[in-house]
Image (spheres, rainbow, N blue to C red):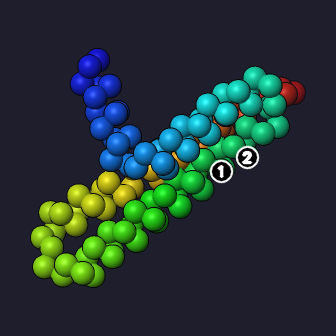
Amino acid sequence: MATTLTSIIHLFVEGGYLGMSAITVLLTLLFFAAWKAPAWVENIGKIAFAVGLIWAFAGLRQALDYLSSNPDTPMVIINRGLKVTLIPAIYGAIVYVVSQIIAIFQKPRL
């Protein structure tokens, strides 16, 4: 359990505090909306996915800026940078999937 929590915190830090915190706030709002404003659930999920993508593209831009000034960078470092860049996009996609699952359960049944 401790290693799982440590790895989640490590991913949160690697993904960038600002973007990961924004997606976490949107996840919290998603659960609140599921309770109080069900019509907003899908939109909050879409916003979380968009924030994850924007943050990932910002990280990719930062990585490309670094590579343009340091052309002799080893492939291992480039691969690690690309892996870290995808963390917020994956987190945003997970929040989006959670919003879709909530929306499915909230729809009236026939």
Question: Could you tell me which quadrant the N terminus lies in?
Answer: top left
Q: Is residue 16 left or right of residue 105?
A: left
Amino acid carrying mark 2 in the image = Asn
Question: Could you tell me which quadrant the C terminus lies in?
Answer: top right
In which quadrant of the rendered view does residue 34 lie? top right
Pinpoint residue 74: horizontal percent, then vertical percent. 12, 70
> Which residue lies under the disc numbered 1?
47
Q: Is residue 87 left or right of residue 67?
A: right
Q: Residue at x 39, y 55 (%)?
A: 86
> Which residue lies under the disc numbered 2?
43
User: Is the C-beta separation of discs 1 and 2 under 8 Å?
Assistant: yes
Pinpoint residue 18: horizontal percent, then vertical percent. 48, 48
Q: Residue at x 69, y 43 (%)?
A: 44
Label 1: few (<14), some or many (≥20) within 10 Å? some
In which quadrant of the rendered view does residue 40 lie? top right
Label 2: few (<14), some or many (≥20) within 10 Å? some
Q: Is residue 101 left or right of residue 35?
A: left
Q: Is residue 17 left or right of residue 105?
A: left
Instruction: Look at the picture and state if 75 lies above or below 24.
Output: below
Instruction: Look at the picture and state if 75 lies above or below 29.
Output: below
Disc 1 on helix, strand or loop? helix
